[in-house]
Image (tube, rainbow, N blue to C red):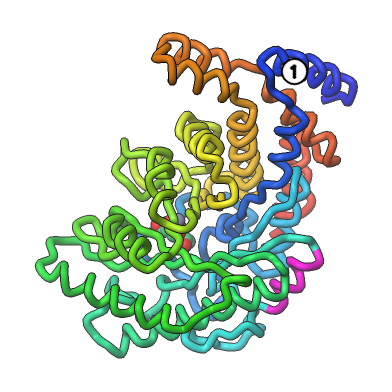
Amino acid sequence: MKEQQINQEFDYAKARYADLGIDVEKAINELDKLSISLHCWQADDVTGFENGDGELTGGIQATGNYPGKARSITELRADIDKAMSLLPGKHRVNIHAFYGDFKGESVDRNQIEPKHFQSWIDWAKEKGYGLDFNCTCFSHEKSADGFTLSHRDPAIRQFWIEHVIRSRKIAEEMGRQLGTKCIHNIWIPDGSKDLTVDRLLYRQNLKDSLDKIFEYKTNDEYMLDSIECKLFGIGSESYVVGSHEFYMGYGVANNKMITLDSGHFHPTEVISDKISSLLLFAPEIMLHVSRGVRWDSDHVVILSDELQALTQEIIRANALDRVHVGLDYFDASINRIGAYVIGVRAAQKALLQALLEPIAQLRTFEANGQNFERLALLEEAKALPWAAVYNKYCQSKGVIAGEAYITDIQKYEVDVTSKR
Ligand code: RNT
Ligand code: ZN
């Protein structure tokens, strides 16, 4: 888009929003403060950088074989830098424990230390990114039978307890060095394919393991703990130990942040409506924004009705400081850098639309019982010129506005990823 055109459209949008009493510049400033956490695992189809065959297990699947995936830390960082260059604002990178910089050494999960992540911290510091972190309780021989922290064998549970405590220490160090709180998320694959009779036993084990994990106290100036539930996975269709009720109960009882992943509920169940309930009982919420197509398929996030509902709920609840937006999907069938940019831009557009909502008028209609008026204004708001505001935001940050980023990613593909 030409600069002049962006400016003209923005001026028109500004006047149009002013009619409704909305200050577009204020909305841009708010949006600019919102960091989105980019999951590192989109760049290499959740492979990680441990020695070994790197087979993905745990009931999650990346399908597709689009050429050019990142094969090393250097390539992965370059790809994330490329994606970041096409995103206005300051963002975060969400790293999994098996992406450590092990320098060819064989380091088992119960041996990881902050030093294995120092080069990530240095890179993040240099680029101005925040970091978030995750323990990796899948793609490992000690998770091969589908159980980790809830395993029947206390020695296996202990192995994973050690891994998660070490991961939390790494998160703490990331937050300390970068001066921005690192969120450590626990997601485990535990569950079974078929009917399970000792459901209570595994859940007791998981509760006990979590209690031991959280006995190690971290500094909450540097890191925060979050726990992520799931409905089912491939190979854990009949029973998942860490269900929604399990983690909601655990989180509320122990004051832990709860991660809501859009793909982790029944197909017609949405996480947008969970925000205003959880905010009353959990300290904070982490989002794994994803797009399930018929199942938890982890498709690239797009500007869907549910994404808009999600961001509206955050803004309407005035909860920007308590809800952390992260992405979680892995599509190996399209250009992976493009997948990042589509997802983050969609999340930003949804947040901007929500920030530009004529909320005062909508609330008045609702309070007066004027439900036709409320619905009509919600419909009109969808077509307000928010895209012109987003383009202006991109331009003001020196980032390509509109569809021209497609060509830029194509160029990176020709110059870089196609040569891998
Ligand atoms: C799996 C969970 C989990 C993972 C990442 C890799 O269903 O969504 O968050 O996607 O930890
Ligand atoms: Zn997730």
Most prominent secondary structure in the magenta stretch? helix
Q: Which residue is mark 1?
A: 13
Q: Nearer the viewer, residue 52 or 92?
A: 92
The picture quadrant for ligand 1 comes to: bottom left
Q: Quadrant of residue 148?
A: bottom left
Figure check: 33 above or below 68 = above
Q: Quadrant of residue 113?
A: bottom right
Residue 353 image point, x, y percent: 61, 29
Which residue is at the far left? Answer: 197
Q: Is residue 375 left or right of residue 58?
A: right
Q: Is residue 235 visible?
A: no
Q: Is residue 213 left or right of residue 147?
A: right
Q: Nearer the viewer, residue 135 or 68?
A: 135
Pick the quarter of the image with the N terminus: top right
Q: Secondary structure at mark 1?
A: helix
Residue 112 image point, x, y percent: 55, 84
Residue 243 image point, x, y percent: 28, 58
53 falls in the magenta region:
no
Q: Residues within 10 Å of mark 1 (few under 14, many from 20)?
A: some
Q: Quadrant of residue 375?
A: top left
123 falls in the magenta region:
yes
The span shown in magenta is 118-126
User: Residue shown at 56%/18% (left/top)?
Assistant: 361
Q: Is residue 333 left or right of residue 85?
A: left
Figure check: 308 above or below 160 = above
Q: Nearer the viewer, residue 335 or 126?
A: 126
User: Residue shown at 51%/62% (left/top)?
Assistant: 46
User: Residue shown at 24%/86% (left/top)?
Assistant: 153
Pick the quarter of the image with the C terminus: bottom right
Question: Which amino acid, mark 1?
Answer: Ala
Figure check: 160 above or below 255 = below
Which residue is at the far right? Answer: 4
